[in-house]
Amino acid sequence: MMIRKIYKSSWFIKVVFVVSLFAIIFIAGLGYKHITNLSKSTDLVIHAFKVNVELEQILSYLKDAETGQRGFIITRDSSYLKPFFEGRIKVNNSFAELKYLTIDNPEQQENLKELSTLIDKRLDNLEIASNYAIKEQTDLAQFKDAFQEGKDYMNAIRSKLNYMITLESDLLKKRNEKYTSTAKITPIFLYVFILLTLVLMYAAYAKINSDIDKLKKYNQQLKVFKEATKQSEIINKHGSWRWNVEEDTFHFSDNLFRLLGEEPNSFDQSIENFMQFVHPEDVEKLSAQVEKMKEEKDLPFIVYRVIHKNGSIHYLKAYGKSTVNSEGHTQLLGTTTDITDEIDHYNTLEKRNKELELNNKELQAFNYVASHDLQEPLRKIQTFLSRLEDKEHDNLSESGKKYVERIHVAAGRMRLLIDDLLQYSRTNKSDEVLKESNINTLLEDAQQDLAEVIVSKNATITVDKIPNMKVIPFQIQQLFGNLIGNSLKYSKKDLDPVITVTYEQVSSEDDKKLSKGSFNEYHKIVISDNGIGFEQEYADKIFSLFSRLHNKDEYSGTGIGLSICRKITDNHRGFIFAKGKPNEGATFVIYLPVI
């Protein structure tokens, strides 16, 4: 994993090339050293050969001198002494050459001194023996002694020369072994090193090829991204610009020209030319911001107008932020967006808000009318009906009495409808502050409001202990009252109502119904009964305003109560769901967020 990461690193190629360069230099150095060693080895062979030749030459010169002496002794011809005299000169020349050749070898230098002494003695001996040979017979004994001494000197010279030649040959052999070993190891080492270098260079080559492929891919992606950016600018109605601070030059994107109603690159890219499109009333404001931008190297959000050639006015919003590029130059990068549609939408929204405010005022007026003006004639109707029943009841026909009774029922339903509408309109106001409330107390208060019905129907209500919550108290009490009242209203005639209220805290992840919610945790309150129930297909319809599943003569009601329940849970950013089965009962599930 680590090796793969190193191979993929951008510096891998640089390291490989540096190593390869040093490897090549090192190989060249080894090659040069190897050639130098071979050259030295050759020089040593030649050197040893020269030394041995000169030593052999000295022996040859001495032999020539000795031979000349013998010829002179036998013939008494002085011409035979020529090799003797020339041999001394040649021996001296050879000695000079040998001293030069063995200057770096102290042992051979010492041997040369000893050899020089022996040769001098031998040459002197030759001269003495020659002198004895040409005298009378009386000097024959001295001649024999000198001749024998010369022979001994010659043997000593041969021995010394052989020793020196052997010494030079041994030295040459050792040096040859050393250089031969180096010559053997060096090619193997060079081969391994070259192979390693080739492997590294191949790895670098493969990496370069891979990078080139990636670069082509990235370039293609960059082209696609560039084209996508251009299309995005066109679709989103924004353009980009760049100001090179140090050079004081500008660059506009193609779509920035279009935002001005112009074709790309239709004018020189400068702030002066750009200002020609700005609305006269906004030129001063924008110019001040540009000057500030030049000083502070920043441009906050600014909105201004531009005028197209066709006379249309467009709103633009610009923003700029200074950056420093890789070369250390300061640039101001900015975007400009056409927000004309946003301004139009905002103006439309403002208009609708004013209309909504007017509607709210009208609704408030309706509430006032419903709570005062509508109830006043209703009270009068009910008052006159009471008087009519008290004073004229006996004078009314049977049909008249039925009409009066129906008027009573209609007036009661009218009053109930007005009260429910007032309750619903009040529930629409969700701006009440949430308060930490005792839910058990609110539930008890709701039951207290229904105490008369609970007793008359012999109902049993079982309630779990519920923790405190942040709610709008009177709305939650109304929620419980409506739901328990609903269970009492739709109870079976031949069966005492049994109402159960349970509680648990649930997570939005555990319940799919809460996936659209904005909270992670919810309070779950379930109210179930054993009443007449309903078909599940109507589970959502029953929360609609004025929705009724039963005949008004069979069950009283206005169809507003459950609508109020949903409005209350909406105000708390919660949910309410219903489940039912005919003749088995109904269940209402309330979810309130944990705040």
Image (cartoon, helix red, strand yellow):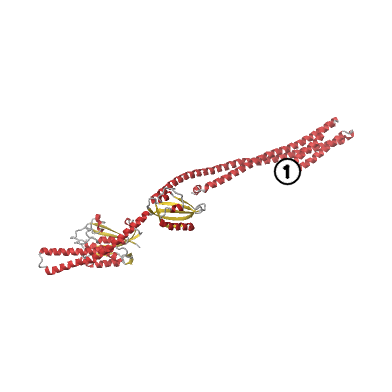
In the displayed structure image, the side of residue 230 where residue 439 appears, left or right:
left
Which quadrant of the structure image shows residue 62? top right
Q: Is residue 206 above or below residue 136?
A: below
Vertical placement of residue 124 versus 383, above or below: above
| 70 or 355, nearer to the observer | 355
- Identified at 49% across, 58% down, the residue is 295
Query: Residue drawn at (52%, 47%), measured in percent from left and top?
Result: 12
Residue 90 in view here: yes
Q: Nearer the viewer, residue 510 or 410?
A: 410
Which residue is situated farthest in the top direction here? 75
Q: Is residue 510 above or below residue 433?
A: above
Amino acid found under the numbered disc labelled 1: Asn
Q: Closest to the observer: 456 or 351?
A: 351
Q: Is the residue marked by circle 1 packed among few (<14), some (14-19), or many (20+) residues within 10 Å?
A: few
Where, quadrant-wise, is the C terminus in this rendering? bottom left
Q: Nearer the viewer, residue 389 or 243?
A: 243
Report which residue position mark 1 lands on.
105
Q: Is residue 226 above or below residue 287?
A: above
